[in-house]
């Protein structure tokens, strides 16, 4: 059977910022107060030109959630492989049993899609409502949206709505040029804002760990993993993102 | 036993408690077993979920929904995809219905006031004690002051009809509802032009002007959703609003009109359409009454003149008039809903209705649609008793020229109660209605309450009005009760019937208002008028719709496929002239301007601002601000003020400011917005509450009703909430 790539195509020009998607998601996934699995970004209007913003100067609303990237920096940042790209449906998942709640993946996501879930002490994010899909339902945000700004489906199925939309329309992806994670949320063209994804920050110890991991795995064993994981947790649980050791030339984000 | 309503309970304890309450109710329940609407493919669901149809009650739209219930707990509300009126959606409020059901701030048992009103000291009563007490108080007032000595204020939900019925059999004509803070002036204007209040065929229109309406935030189904669909098909949207609302943001053109001058804009549009003969002359000859008088009347209202009033450039007015006429009859001047804005709001809306008439859009695709029959039968009830000692009329009769007798005017009713003229009112029965937050001039409402001996409020949570009452009775939410059937019209989408059955048993000791009224009726020797069950009532309503019960059970909605366009073919209009009235003869007879005459609004004095109010998509009037899920979307209100105006007052973003008017004041944070006129400020409704029983929002923001002065529309008596000038000052800490 062909592999799936679940994705969303969002027509942000249909969004009226009613926040039905955010509330539906919060209830469906029992997201705690103060946290969200999805969002609506706002591009403020530009009143400087005429006092009556029109066209591109107008206010614009842009719904979003975890982008289920093809090159997910969060997966790179996870010390325990709890965060992984599911080969079957192309979603990026968090295995609750493996997640130690260290939070390394949080600054590794350019989109701020992840948060610490206080009740389970793990990291949580959008999973395209996996439990709803298992029942044959669409994700809660898609079902509830008044103006149907969000379209969901399998990109690899040429008959799906998302594949058709992608084929027939000019679309774009919202990325930080320094961290192109190849997201699977596509926007119909002219979406805004564009300058909000941050550069992915993957903590140094995690990068080192990922490098030595295969070598030590065989003889260090699970105990050592536990020790390192706890060490990692202690080092990383602070709120400040750890210093990056990227060798790339430093540039200011140009958007 | 005295208990303070404000005693906090933790979330965990609440859930334990509500779980226990649920279990207890299930054991001994006589609640009718409901149709567990479990489609066969879902029966294997590992979670054992059940799915029930219902209709939302978070606002007035009654959108169809499917409630998922797991282990007796409602875990999710999803849109009923077969519910065409909402186009298969559920908004943020609809999704937050769960937080109304499981709100720790819910009223749990009957409470009797101890200490002063508003002190928050309550005694828990049993239902028998509470109902005995209420009946005794009502009887005492009836004996001493006649039965009209009790004012009834029903909300707008599906059981409110029983409050109206109770008022009738109890014998009081004095009933005021939410409507006189809302849409009476619009209704007046359209009734007096077309003979009925229309629906807008937003989906099929080609051109739409919205003035005094904000459909992308004040959600009305299907209009809000259809507005997006029609825009995607190229329909043009022009918005007039002193505020850059989300509707303005998504429009083709937005004009920050000078508040109160919309009539100048519309009269000028009419001027262009008539002077350039852009209307369908054959149609006008056949259908319209008073075109000659109107043509003469609008000669004075040129676009150049209008520009000086409404600050919309004359060339734009002329262009919009031509575009609008070119799109006619699939062109609409949107009638709007809440028109409680200016002292001449009926006449403002008349100018819009008259323009619609000239566009020839009545009863045609993309225009204004007539009401359709849904087919519900009127339930036969015994004739209400006649009480000889009652006064002749309701208390607020004749206070405005063209008041609706069944709605009255809260403002005029309140004034008359305070003056106790022509007769005193001493009791108040309130059901899911919150005048202390929704009616302008809160101090005046408090003054009215001081004149009353007995105030009874039935509600789900401790609203401000409940907080100031003498007896508070807990009602269940819409997910816990059985309701009558309700007919809905959704523009071109449908004419349909919805109903409700309990999705879960009622929590705590809450009791539906129907049961409360029935038991009160029994105690007042009026039992024979409530000698029916809800089931029987609903059966009668549906008796001529043989397929309705099945459809409601299987689809959660029943559609009556009735004619949509051309309803008026071969029919006369329900007006005096039997035509569409550009010129209203009845108005002329009463000394009212038969055609709208423009009067410039009062100038904003220097150093003051005009305060305007309006909705957002999270709150229904003043009722959902404390809902935990919605509270997170907007935890408090703020004062929208233009950066230049703010700079002149030394106000920065987030500063605490004091807003004061001739009648009240409030403190809230400033929100600097380029998208509001420099002479205007705005705040959202429902904050600055008195009730300590609303724990999420108590102490947050300012109360709109406290600051607004109580102007009213001269014709309909509708509240006029955009007539107040306020002073704004930075609050020095």
Image (cartoon, rainbow, N blue to C red):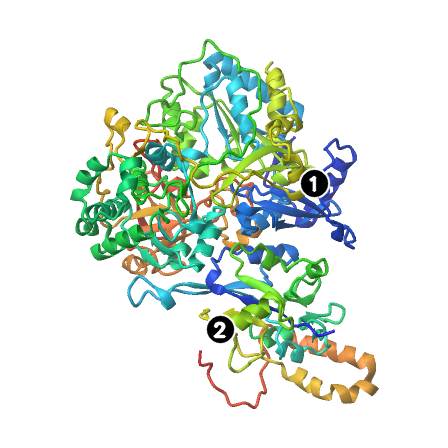
Pointer 1 residue:
B504
In depth, the one of B593 and B261 nearer the eye is: B593
Quarter of the image containing the N terminus of chain A? bottom right
Q: Is residue B588 above or below residue B78?
A: above
Dot in front, 2 or 1: 2
User: Residue at 64% of width from left, 22% of height from top?
Assistant: B532
In depth, the one of A83 and B14 nearer the eye is: A83
Q: Secondary structure at mark 2?
A: loop
In depth, the one of B355 and B443 nearer the eye is: B355
* Residue B612 shows in the view: yes
**Residue A67's image quarter?**
bottom right
Instruction: Using a 10 Å C-alpha cutoff, classify the residue at mark 1 as few (fewer than 14 neighbours), some (14 to 19) or many (20 or more).
Output: many
**Residue B350's image quarter?**
top left
Q: Position of residue A126 (x, y in %)?
A: 63, 65
User: Residue at 53% of width from left, 66% of height from top?
Assistant: A10
Q: Are marks 2 and 1 on the same chain?
A: no
Q: Chain of mark 1?
A: B
Q: Position of residue B636 (x, y in %)?
A: 47, 51
Q: Is residue A159 left or right of residue B142?
A: right
Q: Is residue B177 above or below residue B666?
A: above
Q: Secondary structure at mark 1?
A: loop
Pointer 2 residue:
A170
Q: Is residue A248 left or right of residue B216?
A: right
Q: Is residue B2 above or below residue B253?
A: above
Q: Chain of mark 2?
A: A
User: Residue at 58% of width from left, 82% of height from top?
Assistant: A243
Q: Is residue B560 left or right of residue B481?
A: left
Q: Position of residue A72 (x, y in %)?
A: 63, 77
């Amino acid at each position: 059977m062909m592999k799936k790539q679940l994705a969303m195509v969002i027509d942000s020009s249909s969004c009226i910022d009613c926040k039905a998607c955010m509330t539906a998601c919060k209830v469906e996934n029992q997201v705690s107060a103060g946290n969200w699995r999805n969002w609506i970004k706002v591009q403020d209007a530009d009143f400087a030109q005429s006092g009556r913003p029109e066209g591109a100067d107008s206010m614009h609303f842009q719904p979003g959630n975890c982008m289920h990237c093809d090159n997910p920096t969060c997966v790179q940042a996870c010390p325990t492989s709890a965060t992984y790209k599911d080969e079957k449906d192309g979603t990026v998942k968090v295995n609750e049993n493996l997640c130690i709640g260290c939070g390394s993946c949080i600054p590794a996501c350019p989109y701020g899609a992840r948060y610490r879930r206080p009740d389970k002490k793990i990291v949580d994010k959008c999973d395209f409502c996996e439990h709803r899909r298992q029942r044959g339902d669409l994700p809660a945000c898609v079902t509830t949206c008044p103006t149907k700004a969000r379209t969901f489906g399998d990109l690899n199925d040429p008959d799906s709505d998302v594949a058709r939309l992608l084929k027939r329309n000019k679309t774009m992806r919202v990325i930080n040029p320094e961290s192109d994670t190849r997201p699977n949320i596509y926007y119909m063209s002219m979406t805004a804002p564009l300058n909000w994804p941050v550069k992915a920050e993957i903590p140094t110890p995690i990068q080192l760990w990922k490098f030595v991991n295969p070598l030590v795995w065989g003889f260090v064993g699970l105990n050592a993993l536990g020790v390192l994981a706890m060490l990692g947790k202690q080092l990383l649980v602070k709120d400040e993102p750890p210093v990056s050791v990227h060798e790339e030339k430093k540039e200011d984000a140009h958007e | 036993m005295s208990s303070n309503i404000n005693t906090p309970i933790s979330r965990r304890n609440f859930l334990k408690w509500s779980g226990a309450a649920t279990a207890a109710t299930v054991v001994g329940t006589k609640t009718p077993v409901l149709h567990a609407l479990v489609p066969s493919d879902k029966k294997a669901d590992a979670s054992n979920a059940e799915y029930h149809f219902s209709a939302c009650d978070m606002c007035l739209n009654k959108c169809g929904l499917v409630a998922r219930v797991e282990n007796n707990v409602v875990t999710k509300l999803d849109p009923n995809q077969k519910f065409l009126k909402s186009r298969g959606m559920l908004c943020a409020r609809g999704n937050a219905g769960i937080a109304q059901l499981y709100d720790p701030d819910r009223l749990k048992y009957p409470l009797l006031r101890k200490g002063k009103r508003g002190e928050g000291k309550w005694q828990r009563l049993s239902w028998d004690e509470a109902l005995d007490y209420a009946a005794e108080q009502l009887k005492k007032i009836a004996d001493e002051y006649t039965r009209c000595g009790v004012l009834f204020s029903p909300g707008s939900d599906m059981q409110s009809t029983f409050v109206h019925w109770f008022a009738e059999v109890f014998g009081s004509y004095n009933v005021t509802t939410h409507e006189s803070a809302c849409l009476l002036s619009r209704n007046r204007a359209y009734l007096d032009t077309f003979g009925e209040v229309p629906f807008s065929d937003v989906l099929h229109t080609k051109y739409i002007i919205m003035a005094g309406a904000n459909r992308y935030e004040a959600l009305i189904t299907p209009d809000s959703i259809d507005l997006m669909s029609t825009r995607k098909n190229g329909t043009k949207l022009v918005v007039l609003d002193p505020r850059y609302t989300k509707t303005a943001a998504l429009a083709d053109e937005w004009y920050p009109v000078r508040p109160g001058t919309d009539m100048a804009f519309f009269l000028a549009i009419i001027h262009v359409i008539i002077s350039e003969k852009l209307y369908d002359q054959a149609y006008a000859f056949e259908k319209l009454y008073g075109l000659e008088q109107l043509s003469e009347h609008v000669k004075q209202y040129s676009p150049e003149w209008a520009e000086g009033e409404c600050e919309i450039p004359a060339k734009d007015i002329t262009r919009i008039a031509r575009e609008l006429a070119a799109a006619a009859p699939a062109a609409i001047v949107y009638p709007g809903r809440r028109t409680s804005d200016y002292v001449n709001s009926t006449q403002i809306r008349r100018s819009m209705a008259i323009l619609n008439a000239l566009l020839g859009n009545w009863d045609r695709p993309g225009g204004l649609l007539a009401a359709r029959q849904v087919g519900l039968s009127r339930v036969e009830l015994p004739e209400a008793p006649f009480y000889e000692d009652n006064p002749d009329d309701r208390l607020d009769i004749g206070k405005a020229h063209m008041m609706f007798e069944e709605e009255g005017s809260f403002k005029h009713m309140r004034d008359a109660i305070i003056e106790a003229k022509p007769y005193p009112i001493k009791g108040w029965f309130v059901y899911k209605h919150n005048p202390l937050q929704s009616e302008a001039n809160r101090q005046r409402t408090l003054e009215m309450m001081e004149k009353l001996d007995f105030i009874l409020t039935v509600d789900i949570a401790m609203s401000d009005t409940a907080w100031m009452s003498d007896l508070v009775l807990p009602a269940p939410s819409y997910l816990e009760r059985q309701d009558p059937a309700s007919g809905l019209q959704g523009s071109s989408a449908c004419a349909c019937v919805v109903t409700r059955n309990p999705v879960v048993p009622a929590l705590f000791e809450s009791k539906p208002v129907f049961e409360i009224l029935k038991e009160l009726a029994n105690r007042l020797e009026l039992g024979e008028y409530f000698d029916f069950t809800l089931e029987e009532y609903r059966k009668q309503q549906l008796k001529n719709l043989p397929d309705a019960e099945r459809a409601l059970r299987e689809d959660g909605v029943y559609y009556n496929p009735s004619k949509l366009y051309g309803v008026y073919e071969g029919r006369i209009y329900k007006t005096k002239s039997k035509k569409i009235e550009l010129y209203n003869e009845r108005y002329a007879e009463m000394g009212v301007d038969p055609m709208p005459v423009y009067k410039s609004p009062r100038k904003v004095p220097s150093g003051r601002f005009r305060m305007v109010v309006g909705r957002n998509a999270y709150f229904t009037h003043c009722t959902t601000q404390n809902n935990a899920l919605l509270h997170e979307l907007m935890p408090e209100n703020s004062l929208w003020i233009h950066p230049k105006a703010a700079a002149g007052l030394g106000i920065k973003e987030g500063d605490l400011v004091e807003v004061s008017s001739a009648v009240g004041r409030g403190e809230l944070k400033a929100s600097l917005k380029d998208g509001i006129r420099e002479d205007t400020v705005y705040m959202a409704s429902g904050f600055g509450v008195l009730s300590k029983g609303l724990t999420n929002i108590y102490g947050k923001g300012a109360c709109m009703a406290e600051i607004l002065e109580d102007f009213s529309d001269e014709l309909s008596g509708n509240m006029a909430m955009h007539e107040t000038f306020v002073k704004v000052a930075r609050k020095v800490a």
